[in-house]
Every structure is written in structure tokens, then in C-alpha cells.
Amino acid sequence: MLSTEKSHSKREAIGFVKKVGSGGDQSGGAGSVGIGFLSTKSLNQGSDTKEYTLHHHFALDCVAIPKITISVMASISLPSICPSAALSFQDKCKEKTKSRSSSKSVFSVKTKSHGQITMAVAVNTSRFDNITMAPPDPILGVSEAFKADTSEMKLNLGVGAYRTEELQPYVLKVVKKAENLMLERGENKEYLPIEGLAAFNKATAELLFGADNPVLHQQRVATIQGLSGTGSLRVAAALIERYFPGAKVLISSPTWGNHKNIFNDARVPWSEYRYYDPKTVGLDFDGMVADIKAAPEGSFVLLHGCAHNPTGIDPTPEQWEKIADVIQEKNHIPFFDVAYQGFASGSLDEDASSVRMFAARGMELLVAQSYSKNLGLYAERIGAINVLCSSADAAVRVKSQLKRIARPMYSNPPVHGARIVANVVGNPDFFNEWKEEMEMMAGRIKSVRQKLYNNLSAKDKSGKDWSFVLKQIGMFSFTGLNKTQSDNMTDKWHVYMTKDGRISLAGLSSAKCEYLADAIIDSYHNVS
Ligand SMILES: Cc1ncc(COP(=O)(O)O)c(C=O)c1O
């Protein structure tokens, strides 16, 4: 407690303030940092909590000092205080002192002390001192490290964001056109409804399921706009937590780094199913099916609709059918994460084929969508959560509950990205332009994938088969490099990537393919 009240305080001692401890200390070495009178008053009658006030002291910059000692040099009015007894209260101090500009500092302390006191005070004590430092995000933290690297050779293959051949961020031309149109129309910035922009919700569901899909005509899909893929997944996770208590979500091993965080934070239990086979650098299809089969009936199965992140390994159409069989058999609920529609193959329809096949079987399912990658709207946070239900009536109820979840989380979603998507999808010329640009982006990624493979196989004389690079799809390649090898990529070659061996080919230029191949070959063969 910091108090300016003087009326009940009594001068009791002359004290000096001295720094102890070192964490966070910016003031230099140990020593006295202030001197003055101490006074106390009992905060509550009969309580042993006293407020200590340091009056008229000389003070150096105590604000930057985490711990100080207050030593009472002479007792004035409290007979029980004598010059050299000690009272430590650094953890109990209720408020940080202000000693730089004020002539008075006040602390509250529980004291049982008799006799002289030396008080160790946490001057800069915060109510948040028990909050420890969070580790950097394994994906976004890579970009921070990249920025700090001064090497000319550095390459950021960490974050999944599209770059041009010049390794610059790219704003789609069609997005700029849609934005210009929006400006011309002078659209306002009023709140959207909780479920988002109606035109966006219609467009996004049509893009996903196909405009003429019967599930849309039957009004069996509950769609609300979400805060991109992540926010949409989070709302769906809250729905699961609320209406399917105890149900597990099965997640592929490995998966996109944020999936586990999302379900953990939503308090939804999850477990992993086998997905990646390090021996083949391919899909462990038998393991996947066996694990889905072994899960408790009625589990949610999280599936990457296309371009699996981080592996870039997708099931074949035949494998998708078998996955659907086992999910149906076990009465599980498929939960698709579609973050790369159109970006994987270059075709919006092809990349939605897994979802559409499940829907055509009459299955109920959830789909989170994102427009971060395919429209390059990373920072606009635009996506959607769709729940396909077996009846229109169920869809209405589900939608009402999705809105109920969204309202206290973020109230209503942002409008800008929603309008861009609605304009692009709703205007045939823009829509065609978008498809062309998406093909161009997907094509550039495919071409560096091919070039990387060519360099790897030409330069590596060990006979290692690098063809897995070509079999993978989408933005990423899972190189099979372990953590130490990935560290070597960064430390020696200035190639920034996630420590699971994933590289984003969207951040690779044709000109850097040879350099990257050298780095991979060196890390693979010379580091274990
Ligand atoms: C598999 C997967 N799901 C969801 C997302 C969510 O991305 P955003 O929240 O930017 O839409 C990503 C982004 O990398 C992803 O790879």
C-alpha cells in the first residue's frame, strides 16, 4: 500500500535504505541508496501489519532496484525497536516504494519484530513477480532470431508466409483492387454482428463445400466468422469443451505447433495419433488408422484438410476414404483444419476435396478455415468456423451457441478482411484473378521445391533418396533433420527454421536453392 496520509503516523526511527540482491538492478554496486526517517502506523487495530514510511530521504534510483534493506539506525518512539535487529519483508511488501522523486516512501509490512530492524524491502516488487518468463513461441520466435542476424546469407524459412522471388512479402493484386473498391464505396466501420459479415459467411461456406453442395441448400451448416484459423479453432474447441465434456481430440503427431496450445487453453483433452513415419519420411497410414480406431468412441479427429503442417504429407484420395470409414465406424466426429485451401495444389476445389468427400457421406463435421495464406491476409485475422450438422434445426442451435461463445471472447469480429473475401469471391472477375494469383504462388513454391530437390540429389553423393521433398505438398517441407541438425542449419548456415526440421518453401527463392541444399547436406551428414 502506498499512502500519503500523515495524520496517524509517528516518527519512530532514523533509517537508511540499502540495496540487497542483484536481479534487475540497474544502479550499479551495493550500498546505501537513501537515508531518512522511518515512521510507522498500525493499519488495523490489533493487527501486526504496520505501514513504514521513509521521510525526507536522499534517494538514488530505487525504482530500478528490486530489493533494498532498510536499516533502522535509531529508534525514536518505539521502545521495542533497537539498533541492529532485523526484519525481512521483501516478499511481504505490499507496494513498491517510490523513492526517486518523492521525499517519502511507504511500505506495508507484517511485523512481529521486537528490537532493531533491518528490513529487506523489495522496492520494485510487483504483484506480478510470481509470473515467470514465458518461452519464445517456437514458430514466431524464429522470426525474432532471424531479424537479429546480420549475415547476408540469412534465410527465414521459419514462418509459413509467402515471399516473392526477391524474398519480400506479397500483397495480392486482387486484394488491393478489392480494398480500392471498398474505399470508393466509403464503407463504414460499424460493429459487425457477433457471427460476422453475412456476405463473408455465405462466401466462405460456398468456397469450402462448393456453391451447389446440398448441405448448403439444406441449411445444415452453421458458419460464423472467426479470428482467422487460430481463432476459429479456438471457438470450436470451446464448443467441444462445453457440449462434449470429457471428449478427446485426436491430433496428428506431429502437428502445427499451436494446436496443442489451443486445446490446452480450452481445457479439451487431446491425444496423438501416428502420422509421420521417419523411416520413409512419409505417412504412417497404418499407425494413423490403428490409433483412430483405438480411440474412445465419439472422439473428435483433427485432420488437416490439405497440405499437412508441418510434414507436407497428405493422404491419397483412397487413404482419405479409409480414414473416413474408420471415423464413421467409431462414431467419431471429424474436425478439419483448412488453412491452405487453394494454396496446396493451386486449386480451391481440389484442396477442399477431403472435406467434401466426408460431407458427401452424410457425416457431421467441423471445419476451421483461414484466409491468411491463400489471400495473403495474415494480419487481417479472417477465417471461419463451420459446423455441418445432420439437420437445419441442429445448425441453427449450434450457430446460436457459437455466437454465445464468441460474444464474451471478442464480441464481434473485424470487418476489413471479411469484406475483402466477400468482394473477391462475390465478383467473378476478382475471383478469377485470385485463382490466377493463387496458382502463381503455389507454382512458385512448387518450382523451388523441384529446384531444391534437383540440387540435393545432384550435390549429395551419398546415394540418399531425397524424393520425399517432391512428394510433399504445400508451403512446407519436412526435411527429416533433427534438432541438432536444425540448430546447425541456423548456427552455421544462417538458415532459420523450426527445430522439428520443417522449412517453409514459401520463404525460399530460386536463387537460394543451391545454398539451402548445401546447408541441408552438411547438416544431415556432418551433424548427428
Ligand atoms: C495447420 C494450421 N492451422 C491453422 C493455422 C492458423 O493460421 P491463422 O490463424 O494465421 O489463420 C495455421 C497457420 O500456420 C496452420 O498451419
Image (spheres, rainbow, N blue to C red):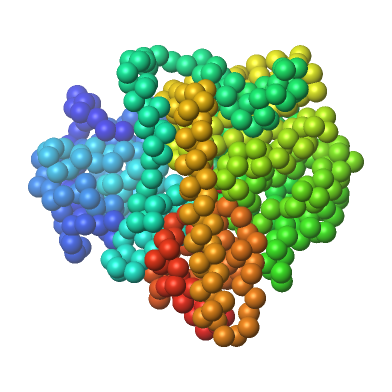
Tell whether 261 sits left or right of 135. right
Q: Nearer the viewer, residue 395 or 52?
A: 395
* Residue 264 lies in quadrant: top right
Quadrant, the C terminus: bottom right
x%, y% of residue 43? Answer: 33, 29
Q: Is residue 502 above or below residue 308?
A: below
Tell whether 78 sits left or right of 36. right
The residue depicted at 20 percent of the width and 33 percent of the height is: 10
The residue depicted at 39 percent of the width and 66 percent of the height is: 511
x%, y% of residue 228? Answer: 52, 34
Number of numbered discs overlaid on the protein picture:
0
Q: Is residue 411 above or below residue 253?
A: above
Tell whether 425 sits left or right of 148. right
Q: Quadrant of ligand 1?
A: top right
Q: Is residue 253 above or below residue 376?
A: below
- Residue 41 visible somewhere in the drawing: yes
The residue depicted at 69 percent of the width and 27 percent of the height is: 387
Q: Nearer the viewer, residue 79 or 452?
A: 452
x%, y% of residue 283? Answer: 73, 60
Q: Which residue occupies the extreme right position in the image?
A: 329
- Residue 237 visible somewhere in the drawing: no
Quadrant, the N terminus: top left
x%, y% of residue 221? Answer: 70, 23
Q: Nearer the viewer, residue 212 or 497?
A: 212
The residue depicted at 9 percent of the width and 47 percent of the height is: 58
